[in-house]
Image (cartoon, rainbow, N blue to C red):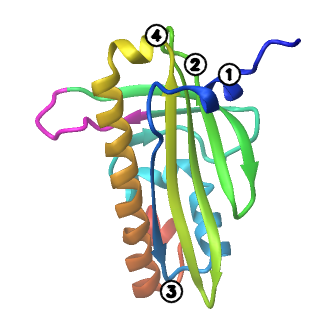
Amino acid sequence: MADKSKKELLAESNDMVPIAGTVEVDIPIDELWECFTHGNWWPHWNKCFFWVRNKELTLGKQLVWCFQPIRWWYLYKMPASAKIVEVEPEKKVTWEVTIVPGMYARHTYHMEDLGNGRSRFGSWEKAYGWGFRLSKGFWKAHFTFVKDLSLEGAKNLEKIYMEKGALNKETVAG
């Protein structure tokens, strides 16, 4: 019998319940997806990000970024790196984090076309491993922070879209 993949082990793990949520926005899926694929724009609409290096989200590439602190008074910025393992246009992007010793995590941003110019945007994250369990409280708070600010960020994009009629470099990152 072959060894189980990290993805399979994650699915079976009881180390945590996934941190997940969705929000509906008045943005056509093609417009939302096109904006979302520019990772370097994320800090302009999603306040959990301080900086993102990637201009595009490409399957198999490293995603490199820096998070804001989970509380404004904490004096840190947290660098991160992950491998992009899934890209389904107008559906989802998933990356896996393996840089923390003893921890494996997957994060997915997903979206769904609801028709009539509406979309559902979501965030999903789960981790497992001894390294995760050692600092589980921090990671669960961090994952919740990312989810909450990402959903709030999608609503920020909706405001921009409603005011400007487009999500592009000038309207989002200008």
How far is mark 1 from mark 2, CA to CA?
A: 10 Å
Camera-side residue: 133 or 29? 133
Q: CA distance from mark 1 to mark 3?
A: 42 Å
Q: CA distance from mark 4 to mark 3?
A: 47 Å
Q: Amino acid at mark 1?
A: Lys
Q: Is residue 88 left or right of residue 108?
A: right
Image marks 1 and 2: residues in contact by CB distance under 8 Å: yes
Residue that label 2 marks: 98
Q: Which residue is mark 3?
A: 165
Q: Magenta span covers which residues?
A: 66-75
In 3D space, how far apart are the residues under numbered discs 3 and 2 (Cα atoms)?
Answer: 39 Å
Residue designated by label 1: 6
The crowd level at tag 3 (other Cα within 10 Å; few <14, some 14-19, many 20+) is few
- Left or right: 30 as drawn, with respect to 20: right
Residue 165: x percent and y percent? 51, 86
Q: Amino acid at mark 3?
A: Gly
| Crowding at mark 1 (Cα within 10 Å: few <14, some 14-19, many 20+) | some
Q: Nearer the viewer, residue 3 or 98?
A: 3
Q: Position of residue 39 (x, y in %)?
A: 55, 48
Circle nearer the viewer, 1 or 2 = 1
Residue at image mark 4: 130
| Marks 4 and 2 close (CB-CB < 8 Å) | no
Query: Looking at the image, is mark 4 or mark 3 nearer the viewer?
Result: 4
